[in-house]
Image: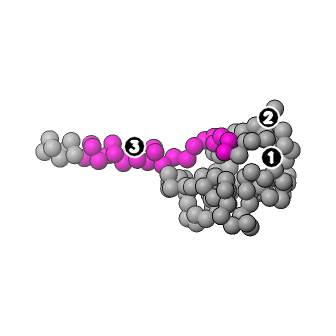
Amino acid sequence: MYNLKLAAAGILALLLSSSALAAPPDVITIDDCAAKKSPVEFPHAAHFELAECSSCHHTQEGLSKETADQAKPCSECHNTPEKATTPSCGETSLKKNQFHINCVACHKEKEAGPTKCNDCHPK
């Protein structure tokens, strides 16, 4: 009986620790492409109620807070894109940088959130 209780406690501890690992970060520092401007502190948790995970993690349909440990960072595809049509984070243009395309466009559409360079990239 003691071994059964010990095993159950161990399984419970494992489940609790693995769910804690899956929690998405509250803030993400986007510094992979910070060659010309300062890194961006992205308030990840503030966006949970505003958008689906796949809005940004667009190659990962079905991603959720529960499966956040499986999320690929933007840099995996956008630092050195394989295709010429894939937006690059190395570009500063509003039409060629994936963050500028997605984030600024959404902020303008919803009339909320930063839209100017220094709003995201502090000096």
In the image, which disc is placed on residue 113? 1
Find the magenta span and give its range: 8-32
Q: Give the spatial CA distance, label 1 vs label 3.
A: 34 Å
Q: Give the spatial CA distance, label 2 vs label 1.
A: 15 Å
Instruction: Decide if residue 101 is in sight here.
Output: yes
In the image, taking residue 19 as reference, residue 32 lies left or right, namely: right
x and y percentages locating residue 45 in the rendered image: 63, 45
SS category of the residue bearing label 2: loop
Q: Which residue is mark 3?
A: 17
SS category of the residue bearing label 1: loop
Kindly identify the amino acid type of the residue bearing the numbered disc 2.
Pro
Magenta highlight on residue 9: yes
Q: Give the spatial CA distance, label 2 vs label 3.
A: 36 Å
Residue 28 or residue 63, whichever sits in front: 28
Q: Is residue 15 above or below residue 105?
A: above
Residue at 53 percent of width and 53 percent of height: 68
x and y percentages locating residue 30 in the rendered image: 67, 43
Kindly identify the amino acid type of the residue bearing the numbered disc 3.
Ser
Q: In front of the other: label 2 or label 3? A: 2
In the image, which disc is placed on residue 122? 2
